[in-house]
Amino acid sequence: MTQTIQEPFQVPGYTLAVLAESLYLINLLLLPGLTFIILLWLYVKHENHSPPLASCHLRQTLVASVWAGLLLILINGIIIAMGGYKAPYTWVIAILYFTTCHSLLVLLGILGLAKAMAGKLFRYPLIGPVELR
Amino acid sequence: MQYSSQAVAKPYFIAAIGLFVGQILFGLIMGLQYVVGDFLFPAIPFNIARMVHTNLLIVWVLFGFMGAAYYLIPEEAEKELHSPLLAIVLFWTFLIAGVLTILGYLLMSYAKLAAFTGNSFLPTMGREFLEQPTITKIGIVIVALGFIYNVGMTVLQGRKTVVNLVLMTGLIGLAVMFLFSFYNPSNLVLDKYYWWWVVHLWVEGVWELILGSILAFVLIKITGVDREVIEKWLYVIIAMALITGIIGTGHHYYWIGTPEYWQWWGSVFSALEPLPFFLMTVFAFNMVNRRRREHPNKAATLWALGTAVMAFLGAGVWGFLHTLAPINYYTHGTQITAAHGHMAFYGAYVMIVLTIISYAMPLLRGRAANSNKAQVLEMWSFWLMSIAMVFITLFLTAAGILQVYLQRATDTPLAFMAVQEKVALFYWLRETAGLVFFIGLVIYLISFFVTGEQKLAVPAGATAMN
């Protein structure tokens, strides 16, 4: 009996899953905001009636993008508002926080993209919703 | 181990690790001298400790690259190494020259070393990272030529794969670029201009080819993913590395007296330099996710993934942090540069050498993988060294941001040494993280001597789990 190995791109929902992860990364790295709107549109259009792989990655990337926005914009705003624009330590904390947080969010996106490209489900640690199905 | 001549890699790996220990010891001495200025003075002044720290790094990474090439090229070419004897002769030549050079730095004044080694006949000394006496530089060229001849003949007479061709391209590039260290014009702008052809085009050019090919080789072996898939990734990664890295040299030309257009060329191309590291991380995780076998050497898999992540952070993110000309105007030559340098070198080049050592050493010692006990210890060393390096980078970045603000950005700037006192806390924290790194390194060394139930040796021509 011959056993055929299924290639990742043959898994239903592969393209949409890779697209969702790519949009998450582009939102962080290249075109923030605009790419999030495209991701939101894809989520609304496909989430309920797409294969498990695609809906998982769509849901995860959308929630993670919202978290990314909060962590990067809101927290940094608070740091600067509390520390004051002219205080040197405000900049030490703000730049270190932004660089570390942004890098971690990008790394999570890379892990998500690698999983999607391997045709596998993925949950963003800490910030991704728990998958019930 | 499939070919007996691959065994010549072993002394190269051992020497690399030995010199690595020396590099870290001098790093610790220097880290302490940042806050206790007269520590070990006058026996080991700061400038000497720094020179030994950086030169040892370069030399041991080169030993690692050569060991990697001697290990993987016969396996890729499917034939024995052209001349194992030449490899051993070159090993001892390089090691003796390297050790004598370091002893020269430590035992006599730099000026006396220059006079003693006849620098006046062909002056090449006195430039950062290229401090080696001219005679040592000539020795390096001879070793490099013999090495490239040896591995080159092996590839020419054997199977040509993308992995060994990319590796050969990187190694030849390494040798060719080093020749610019002999060009030492009296015009300082011209000198710096070509100095970067050695320094930048090594670490952000041809060395990335070496990194990519070693990573691809290890991933082929540990994941069992089709070679064709991995080779396509490798092509894209090295293309991006060269497209961005060559003109990216311009980010060193902003303030050295070169034309202003370099501020645009340097900014645009070096802003793209994180791309190959981004792709490398996606590549490594994607291959491990698609693996078709569970390789018994878990530690090597961890090192391979760690290399991609830390290289992306250190070279990619921390490089981007200060690469745009308007930002670099303020950050140039501050501790932010040191932060980037530490994590980039560790992530990209230290870790790739430790990856190939982790994969190849058990095979060179006659087993597919070390015992679980040894691997657990090795993985502890991985986490200790990597986390310590993250903290070294963060503390140096904090020191750098404060330095930029107090010394350059504020309306009432302070003098350099006044600022150094203000950032001393971060230097102490960095030194503490450095000690943790050293503990990780000691555990790494111990892991080589831990015994236990070992995985069986791999028969010639077979892979571990097949």
Image (tube, coloured by chain):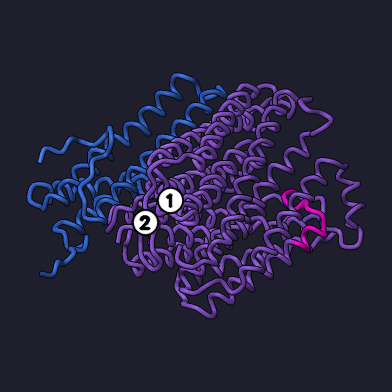
Chain colours: A blue, B purple
- Residue at left 70%, top 33%? B30
Q: Which of marks 1 and 2 is nearer the N terminus?
A: 2
Q: Which residue in the protein does label 2 denote?
A: B222
Q: CB atoms at circles 1 and 2 under 8 Å apart?
A: yes
Mark 2 surroundings within 10 Å by alpha-carbon count, few (fewer than 14), some (14 through 19), many (20 or more): many
**Residue A92 versus residue B7 in the image, above or below:** above
Where does the image place residue B419, in percent across and percent down from the top left? 69, 25
Mark number displayed over residue B163: none
Query: Which residue lies most toward the bottom here?
Result: B157
Choose between B278 and B17: the one closer to the eye.
Answer: B17
Dot 1 amino acid type: Ala
Q: Looking at the figure, which quarter contains the C terminus of chain B? A: bottom left
Mark 2 belongs to chain: B
Q: In this view, does B40 lie to the left or right of B13?
A: right
Structural distance between the alpha carbons of marks 1 and 2: 10 Å
Q: Tell me the amino acid under the disc marked 2.
A: Ile
B312 on left or right of A118: right
Helix, strand or loop status at disc 1: helix
Q: What element carries label 2?
A: helix
Residue segment shown in magenta: B128-139
Q: Residue at x 17, y 63 (%)?
A: A6
Query: Which chain does tag 1 point to?
Result: B
Residue on which the image places disc 1: B304
Check if residue B133 falls in the magenta segment.
yes
Furthest-top residue in view? A82
Residue B384 shows in this picture: yes
